[in-house]
Image (cartoon, grey):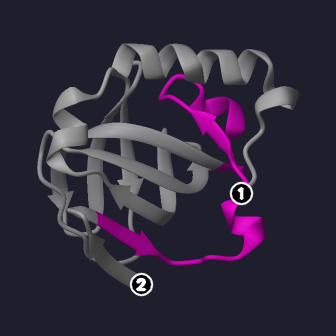
Amino acid sequence: LLVASAMNTSVMDVDSSDEARARHRVNGGLLAQHQGACVCLLGRVVSCPSPTCLLLEASDSVQVKAQLSREFHAEPGSLVEVVGSALSDNSVSVQHLVQLDRGCSENFDMDMYNKAVQICNKFSQAYYTKP
């Protein structure tokens, strides 16, 4: 586990292998289509029900649980990007998490981002993400 802070951005990394990092960018509504696959989801923190769980509002306003293997504190209203396995209960088992700084969170156009996610999924062969 690696936890770091740089330029007010927090990072939690459980598995940095290339296989764990290959992913599909999704919103809450698309999560069910990718059960068992590694996904990337951006959401605004609604609450932290426990130290190892975040309740996120995805770019399409669907609520998603991010299940963490380690404790992580995220400020409600902040943006986090999670990478992990899509589960059947509309949640993500998180392998990697990035919390964006306050400036990014306040000025981020979530509607535009959601449109980009929809385009990436409509043309998934052209926009499959693998770092």
Residue situated in front as seen by the camera: 129 or 1? 129
**Residue 61 can be seen, yes or no:** no
Q: Position of residue 100 (x, y in %)?
A: 29, 51
- The quadrant in which the N terminus is found is bottom left
Q: Which residue is mark 1?
A: 131
Left or right of residue 86, residue 77 in this image? left
Residue at mark 2 to residue at mark 1: CA–CA distance: 19 Å
Left or right for 42, reference 7: right
Q: Which residues are magenta?
A: 10-38
Examine the structure image and report whether residue 117 is included in the region drawn in magenta: no
Q: Residue at x 18, y 58 (%)?
A: 74
Apparent side of residue 97 relative to residue 51 in the rendered image (left or right): right
Secondary structure under tag 2 reads: strand
Q: Say above or below: 77 vs 113.
A: below
The structure residue drawn at horizontal position 87% and vertical position 29%, both measured from the top left corner, is 125
Residue 106 appears left or right of 128: left
Q: Quadrant of the C terminus?
A: bottom right
Where does residue 17 sit, x and y in percent of width and height? Answer: 71, 76
Q: Is residue 37 magenta?
A: yes
Q: Earlier in the sequence, mark 2 or mark 1?
A: 2
* Mark 2 surroundings: few (<14), some (14-19) or many (≥20) residues within 10 A: few
Q: Which mark is residue 2?
A: 2
| Three-letter code for the amino acid on which mark 1 is drawn | Pro
Identity of the residue drawn at 52% across and 22% down: 29
Q: Amino acid at mark 2?
A: Leu
